Image (tube, rainbow, N blue to C red):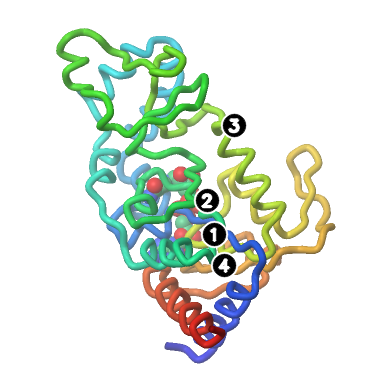
Amino acid sequence: MDASIKNLIQLAAKQLTQAKHAIALTGAGVSTESGIPDFRGPEGVWTKNPEAERRTYEIYPKFVRDPTAYWREMLTEPLTFFTDMEKAQPNPGHFALARLDQVGILKSTITQNIDGLHDKAGSKNLFEYHGSLLKMRCPVCNARYGRDRFNLEHLLKTNELPPLCTKCGNALKSDVVYFGEPIPQDVAEHSYREAQQCDVMLVCGTSAVVYPFASLPIIAAGGTFEDGIPIRYGREAATIIEINGEPTSLTREHVSSYLIAGKTGELLPMLADAVDKMTAARV
Ligand code: NAD
Protein backbone atom coordinates (compact mmCIF):
# COMPACT_ATOMS: atom_id res chain seq x y z
CA MET A 1 0.00 0.00 0.00
CA ASP A 2 1.23 3.44 -1.04
CA ALA A 3 2.65 5.42 1.96
CA SER A 4 0.62 8.50 1.01
CA ILE A 5 -2.62 6.48 1.16
CA LYS A 6 -1.67 5.15 4.60
CA ASN A 7 -1.01 8.73 5.74
CA LEU A 8 -4.35 9.91 4.38
CA ILE A 9 -6.13 7.05 6.18
CA GLN A 10 -4.47 8.14 9.45
CA LEU A 11 -5.47 11.77 8.81
CA ALA A 12 -9.07 10.76 8.02
CA ALA A 13 -9.25 8.56 11.14
CA LYS A 14 -8.00 11.46 13.28
CA GLN A 15 -10.54 13.88 11.78
CA LEU A 16 -13.36 11.36 12.28
CA THR A 17 -12.48 10.69 15.92
CA GLN A 18 -12.23 14.44 16.63
CA ALA A 19 -15.43 15.36 14.76
CA LYS A 20 -18.51 16.62 16.58
CA HIS A 21 -20.85 15.48 13.83
CA ALA A 22 -19.43 13.18 11.15
CA ILE A 23 -21.63 11.69 8.45
CA ALA A 24 -21.11 9.48 5.38
CA LEU A 25 -22.57 9.69 1.89
CA THR A 26 -22.36 6.67 -0.39
CA GLY A 27 -23.06 5.80 -4.02
CA ALA A 28 -23.03 2.86 -6.43
CA GLY A 29 -19.23 2.47 -6.09
CA VAL A 30 -19.50 0.98 -2.57
CA SER A 31 -21.61 -1.86 -3.99
CA THR A 32 -19.59 -2.81 -7.10
CA GLU A 33 -17.50 -5.16 -4.92
CA SER A 34 -20.77 -6.91 -4.00
CA GLY A 35 -21.22 -7.66 -7.71
CA ILE A 36 -23.72 -4.87 -8.44
CA PRO A 37 -22.74 -2.96 -11.58
CA ASP A 38 -23.13 0.80 -11.84
CA PHE A 39 -25.51 2.20 -14.49
CA ARG A 40 -23.42 3.91 -17.14
CA GLY A 41 -19.92 2.40 -16.91
CA PRO A 42 -18.67 -0.01 -19.62
CA GLU A 43 -20.29 -2.92 -17.74
CA GLY A 44 -23.20 -0.73 -16.62
CA VAL A 45 -26.80 -1.89 -16.54
CA TRP A 46 -28.02 0.76 -19.01
CA THR A 47 -25.01 0.32 -21.31
CA LYS A 48 -25.73 -3.39 -21.64
CA ASN A 49 -29.52 -3.15 -21.67
CA PRO A 50 -30.92 0.18 -23.00
CA GLU A 51 -34.43 -1.35 -22.99
CA ALA A 52 -34.21 -1.62 -19.18
CA GLU A 53 -33.38 2.10 -19.00
CA ARG A 54 -36.39 2.96 -21.19
CA ARG A 55 -38.66 0.87 -18.97
CA THR A 56 -37.45 2.52 -15.76
CA TYR A 57 -38.51 5.95 -17.11
CA GLU A 58 -42.03 4.58 -17.55
CA ILE A 59 -42.45 3.07 -14.09
CA TYR A 60 -43.41 6.13 -12.05
CA PRO A 61 -45.99 7.52 -14.53
CA LYS A 62 -47.47 4.01 -14.66
CA PHE A 63 -47.82 3.90 -10.85
CA VAL A 64 -49.49 7.34 -10.83
CA ARG A 65 -51.92 6.33 -13.63
CA ASP A 66 -52.75 2.83 -12.45
CA PRO A 67 -51.21 1.35 -9.29
CA THR A 68 -52.78 -2.06 -9.99
CA ALA A 69 -51.17 -2.30 -13.46
CA TYR A 70 -47.84 -1.13 -11.93
CA TRP A 71 -47.88 -3.92 -9.34
CA ARG A 72 -49.01 -6.55 -11.83
CA GLU A 73 -46.06 -5.68 -14.09
CA MET A 74 -43.59 -5.56 -11.15
CA LEU A 75 -44.65 -9.06 -10.12
CA THR A 76 -45.00 -10.74 -13.50
CA GLU A 77 -42.23 -9.01 -15.53
CA PRO A 78 -39.67 -7.86 -12.94
CA LEU A 79 -36.58 -6.05 -14.20
CA THR A 80 -33.68 -8.51 -13.84
CA PHE A 81 -31.26 -5.94 -12.41
CA PHE A 82 -33.66 -5.36 -9.51
CA THR A 83 -34.01 -9.10 -8.82
CA ASP A 84 -30.20 -9.59 -9.10
CA MET A 85 -29.63 -6.72 -6.65
CA GLU A 86 -31.94 -8.32 -4.09
CA LYS A 87 -29.62 -11.36 -3.94
CA ALA A 88 -26.41 -9.34 -3.33
CA GLN A 89 -24.62 -9.35 0.02
CA PRO A 90 -22.70 -6.56 1.79
CA ASN A 91 -18.92 -6.34 1.25
CA PRO A 92 -16.20 -5.25 3.74
CA GLY A 93 -16.84 -1.56 2.85
CA HIS A 94 -20.49 -1.79 4.01
CA PHE A 95 -19.45 -3.60 7.19
CA ALA A 96 -16.76 -0.98 7.94
CA LEU A 97 -19.31 1.85 7.65
CA ALA A 98 -21.71 -0.12 9.86
CA ARG A 99 -18.94 -0.42 12.50
CA LEU A 100 -18.35 3.35 12.40
CA ASP A 101 -22.11 3.88 12.80
CA GLN A 102 -22.43 1.44 15.69
CA VAL A 103 -19.58 3.01 17.71
CA GLY A 104 -21.19 6.43 17.29
CA ILE A 105 -18.54 7.96 15.01
CA LEU A 106 -20.98 8.34 12.10
CA LYS A 107 -24.17 10.16 13.07
CA SER A 108 -25.83 9.37 9.71
CA THR A 109 -25.13 7.32 6.63
CA ILE A 110 -26.98 8.74 3.63
CA THR A 111 -26.92 6.50 0.58
CA GLN A 112 -28.07 6.85 -3.00
CA ASN A 113 -28.08 3.08 -3.31
CA ILE A 114 -31.32 1.19 -3.51
CA ASP A 115 -29.77 -2.24 -2.88
CA GLY A 116 -30.38 -2.33 0.89
CA LEU A 117 -26.79 -3.45 1.58
CA HIS A 118 -26.04 -0.87 4.30
CA ASP A 119 -29.17 -2.09 6.03
CA LYS A 120 -28.09 -5.74 5.69
CA ALA A 121 -24.60 -4.80 7.01
CA GLY A 122 -26.12 -3.27 10.15
CA SER A 123 -25.95 0.54 9.70
CA LYS A 124 -28.61 1.93 12.04
CA ASN A 125 -28.66 5.67 11.38
CA LEU A 126 -29.32 5.03 7.72
CA PHE A 127 -31.14 7.29 5.25
CA GLU A 128 -31.85 5.81 1.83
CA TYR A 129 -32.14 8.88 -0.38
CA HIS A 130 -33.42 6.96 -3.40
CA GLY A 131 -35.28 4.39 -1.30
CA SER A 132 -34.70 0.66 -0.91
CA LEU A 133 -35.68 -2.37 -2.95
CA LEU A 134 -36.35 -4.20 0.30
CA LYS A 135 -39.14 -1.82 1.35
CA MET A 136 -42.45 -0.39 0.20
CA ARG A 137 -43.55 3.20 0.82
CA CYS A 138 -46.77 5.14 0.91
CA PRO A 139 -46.26 8.14 -1.41
CA VAL A 140 -48.82 10.16 0.60
CA CYS A 141 -47.77 9.71 4.26
CA ASN A 142 -44.26 8.20 3.68
CA ALA A 143 -44.98 5.18 5.93
CA ARG A 144 -42.53 2.39 5.03
CA TYR A 145 -43.03 -1.37 5.22
CA GLY A 146 -40.70 -4.35 4.72
CA ARG A 147 -41.36 -6.12 1.41
CA ASP A 148 -42.33 -9.29 3.32
CA ARG A 149 -45.08 -7.47 5.23
CA PHE A 150 -47.50 -8.16 2.35
CA ASN A 151 -48.02 -11.43 0.48
CA LEU A 152 -47.82 -9.83 -2.96
CA GLU A 153 -48.09 -13.12 -4.88
CA HIS A 154 -51.34 -13.86 -3.04
CA LEU A 155 -52.69 -10.36 -3.74
CA LEU A 156 -51.86 -10.91 -7.43
CA LYS A 157 -53.68 -14.28 -7.56
CA THR A 158 -56.76 -12.97 -5.75
CA ASN A 159 -56.91 -9.71 -7.74
CA GLU A 160 -56.44 -7.64 -4.58
CA LEU A 161 -53.57 -5.47 -5.83
CA PRO A 162 -52.41 -2.83 -5.03
CA PRO A 163 -51.26 -3.31 -1.40
CA LEU A 164 -52.67 -0.48 0.73
CA CYS A 165 -51.04 1.66 3.41
CA THR A 166 -52.36 0.49 6.79
CA LYS A 167 -52.00 4.07 8.12
CA CYS A 168 -53.77 6.14 5.46
CA GLY A 169 -55.23 3.62 2.99
CA ASN A 170 -53.37 4.91 -0.07
CA ALA A 171 -51.84 2.56 -2.68
CA LEU A 172 -48.27 1.58 -1.79
CA LYS A 173 -45.36 1.54 -4.24
CA SER A 174 -41.84 0.22 -3.98
CA ASP A 175 -39.72 2.51 -1.76
CA VAL A 176 -37.36 2.97 -4.74
CA VAL A 177 -37.46 6.54 -6.07
CA TYR A 178 -38.01 6.24 -9.82
CA PHE A 179 -37.10 8.75 -12.54
CA GLY A 180 -39.51 11.68 -12.34
CA GLU A 181 -40.52 10.96 -8.75
CA PRO A 182 -39.75 13.49 -5.99
CA ILE A 183 -37.30 12.51 -3.23
CA PRO A 184 -39.42 11.64 -0.13
CA GLN A 185 -39.66 14.80 1.94
CA ASP A 186 -38.55 13.21 5.23
CA VAL A 187 -35.28 11.90 3.77
CA ALA A 188 -34.63 15.04 1.72
CA GLU A 189 -35.07 17.31 4.76
CA HIS A 190 -32.98 15.12 7.06
CA SER A 191 -30.16 14.90 4.50
CA TYR A 192 -30.16 18.66 3.94
CA ARG A 193 -29.97 19.33 7.69
CA GLU A 194 -27.18 16.79 8.13
CA ALA A 195 -25.17 18.35 5.28
CA GLN A 196 -25.55 21.77 6.93
CA GLN A 197 -24.68 20.50 10.39
CA CYS A 198 -21.78 18.10 9.78
CA ASP A 199 -18.16 19.03 10.39
CA VAL A 200 -16.75 15.94 8.65
CA MET A 201 -18.33 14.25 5.62
CA LEU A 202 -17.04 10.98 4.18
CA VAL A 203 -18.08 10.68 0.53
CA CYS A 204 -17.65 7.14 -0.80
CA GLY A 205 -18.07 5.61 -4.25
CA THR A 206 -20.10 8.29 -5.96
CA SER A 207 -19.37 10.27 -9.10
CA ALA A 208 -21.55 13.02 -7.55
CA VAL A 209 -23.39 13.85 -10.75
CA VAL A 210 -26.96 12.86 -9.79
CA TYR A 211 -28.83 15.83 -8.24
CA PRO A 212 -30.18 16.73 -5.73
CA PHE A 213 -28.00 14.17 -3.86
CA ALA A 214 -24.84 15.69 -5.38
CA SER A 215 -25.68 19.06 -3.78
CA LEU A 216 -25.10 17.60 -0.27
CA PRO A 217 -21.25 17.77 -0.36
CA ILE A 218 -21.49 21.27 -1.86
CA ILE A 219 -23.76 22.37 1.01
CA ALA A 220 -21.35 20.81 3.54
CA ALA A 221 -18.49 22.68 1.88
CA GLY A 222 -20.38 25.91 2.52
CA GLY A 223 -21.81 26.32 -0.96
CA THR A 224 -25.01 28.19 -1.64
CA PHE A 225 -27.14 27.82 -4.74
CA GLU A 226 -28.71 30.29 -7.13
CA ASP A 227 -31.03 28.85 -9.81
CA GLY A 228 -29.59 25.43 -9.01
CA ILE A 229 -25.98 26.54 -9.61
CA PRO A 230 -23.47 26.60 -6.72
CA ILE A 231 -22.30 30.20 -6.45
CA ARG A 232 -20.40 30.70 -3.22
CA TYR A 233 -18.51 28.78 -0.61
CA GLY A 234 -19.43 30.79 2.44
CA ARG A 235 -19.86 29.13 5.81
CA GLU A 236 -17.03 27.44 7.61
CA ALA A 237 -16.68 24.36 5.50
CA ALA A 238 -16.83 20.81 6.75
CA THR A 239 -13.86 18.58 5.99
CA ILE A 240 -14.91 16.51 3.01
CA ILE A 241 -13.04 13.23 2.63
CA GLU A 242 -13.62 11.43 -0.67
CA ILE A 243 -12.92 7.73 -1.03
CA ASN A 244 -13.31 6.80 -4.66
CA GLY A 245 -11.64 4.82 -7.41
CA GLU A 246 -11.04 7.96 -9.48
CA PRO A 247 -11.20 11.75 -9.13
CA THR A 248 -14.70 13.22 -9.52
CA SER A 249 -16.14 16.69 -10.04
CA LEU A 250 -15.91 17.12 -6.24
CA THR A 251 -12.15 16.53 -6.46
CA ARG A 252 -11.64 18.72 -9.50
CA GLU A 253 -13.71 21.63 -8.16
CA HIS A 254 -12.03 21.43 -4.73
CA VAL A 255 -15.28 20.68 -2.94
CA SER A 256 -13.53 17.74 -1.29
CA SER A 257 -10.64 18.46 1.02
CA TYR A 258 -8.76 15.42 -0.32
CA LEU A 259 -9.29 12.16 -2.17
CA ILE A 260 -8.18 8.75 -0.92
CA ALA A 261 -8.01 6.88 -4.22
CA GLY A 262 -8.80 3.18 -4.26
CA LYS A 263 -11.46 0.58 -3.57
CA THR A 264 -13.95 1.28 -0.80
CA GLY A 265 -14.00 -2.45 0.07
CA GLU A 266 -10.30 -2.17 1.01
CA LEU A 267 -9.94 1.42 2.24
CA LEU A 268 -13.02 1.64 4.50
CA PRO A 269 -12.00 -1.38 6.65
CA MET A 270 -8.52 0.19 7.03
CA LEU A 271 -10.15 3.44 8.07
CA ALA A 272 -12.46 1.74 10.59
CA ASP A 273 -9.45 -0.16 12.04
CA ALA A 274 -7.46 3.09 12.36
CA VAL A 275 -10.43 4.75 14.12
CA ASP A 276 -10.70 1.75 16.50
CA LYS A 277 -7.01 2.04 17.41
CA MET A 278 -7.21 5.80 18.00
CA THR A 279 -10.32 5.57 20.18
CA ALA A 280 -8.81 2.64 22.16
CA ALA A 281 -5.62 4.68 22.72
CA ARG A 282 -7.68 7.62 24.06
CA VAL A 283 -9.49 5.53 26.72
P1 NAD B 1 -21.88 6.31 -10.32
O1 NAD B 1 -21.91 5.00 -11.06
O2 NAD B 1 -22.20 7.54 -11.11
O3 NAD B 1 -20.43 6.54 -9.67
C1 NAD B 1 -19.78 5.52 -8.98
C2 NAD B 1 -18.39 6.02 -8.62
O4 NAD B 1 -17.79 5.03 -7.80
C3 NAD B 1 -17.49 6.20 -9.85
O5 NAD B 1 -16.76 7.41 -9.69
C4 NAD B 1 -16.57 4.98 -9.80
O6 NAD B 1 -15.27 5.26 -10.28
C5 NAD B 1 -16.51 4.70 -8.31
N1 NAD B 1 -16.29 3.30 -7.95
C6 NAD B 1 -16.77 2.19 -8.55
N2 NAD B 1 -16.41 1.09 -7.86
C7 NAD B 1 -15.66 1.54 -6.81
C8 NAD B 1 -15.00 0.89 -5.73
N3 NAD B 1 -15.01 -0.43 -5.58
N4 NAD B 1 -14.34 1.66 -4.84
C9 NAD B 1 -14.29 3.00 -4.95
N5 NAD B 1 -14.89 3.68 -5.97
C10 NAD B 1 -15.58 2.94 -6.87
O7 NAD B 1 -22.82 6.13 -9.06
P2 NAD B 1 -23.63 7.19 -8.21
O8 NAD B 1 -22.85 8.44 -8.06
O9 NAD B 1 -24.10 6.48 -7.00
O10 NAD B 1 -24.89 7.54 -9.13
C11 NAD B 1 -25.66 6.50 -9.72
C12 NAD B 1 -27.15 6.57 -9.45
O11 NAD B 1 -27.70 5.30 -9.82
C13 NAD B 1 -27.49 6.74 -7.99
O12 NAD B 1 -28.47 7.70 -7.93
C14 NAD B 1 -28.02 5.40 -7.50
O13 NAD B 1 -29.28 5.55 -6.90
C15 NAD B 1 -28.24 4.57 -8.74
N6 NAD B 1 -27.57 3.24 -8.68
C16 NAD B 1 -27.63 2.50 -7.53
C17 NAD B 1 -27.02 1.26 -7.47
C18 NAD B 1 -27.10 0.47 -6.21
O14 NAD B 1 -28.07 0.58 -5.47
N7 NAD B 1 -26.09 -0.34 -5.91
C19 NAD B 1 -26.33 0.78 -8.58
C20 NAD B 1 -26.29 1.54 -9.74
C21 NAD B 1 -26.91 2.80 -9.77
Residue situated in front as seen by the camera: 190 or 266: 190
Name which of mark 1 and mark 2 comes first in the sequence. Answer: 1
Which residue is tagged 3?
185
**Quadrant location, ligand no. 1:** bottom left
Residue at 40% x, 54% y is: 41
Residue at 64% x, 62% y is: 21
Residue at 52% x, 27% y is: 181
Residue 198 in the image: state x and y as whole percent.
Answer: 67, 59
The answer to whether the residue labelled 3 contacts the one labelled 1, judged by CB atoms less than 8 Å apart, is no
Q: Is residue 82 visible?
A: yes
Ligand 1 within 8 Å, label 3 CB: no
Residue at 48% x, 31% y is: 179
Foreground mark, 4 or 3? 3
- In three-dimensional space, the C-alpha distance between marks 4 and 1, rounded to whole angstroms, equals 10 Å
Amino acid type, mark 2: Ile
- For label 3, the crowd category at 10 Å Cα-Cα, with few meaning under 14, some 14 to 19 and many 20 or more, is few
Amino acid type, mark 4: Glu
Residue 137 in the image: state x and y as whole percent.
Answer: 42, 27
Name which of mark 2 and mark 4 comes first in the sequence. Answer: 2
Q: Is residue 3 left or right of residue 169?
A: right
Residue situated in front as seen by the camera: 216 or 261: 216
Amino acid type, mark 3: Gln
Which residue is tagged 4?
242
- In three-dimensional space, the C-alpha distance between marks 4 and 3, rounded to whole angstroms, equals 26 Å
The answer to whether the residue labelled 1 contacts the one labelled 2, judged by CB atoms less than 8 Å apart, is yes
Name which of mark 4 and mark 1 comes first in the sequence. Answer: 1
Which residue is tagged 2?
110
Which residue is tagged 1?
24
The quadrant of the rendering that contains the N terminus is bottom left
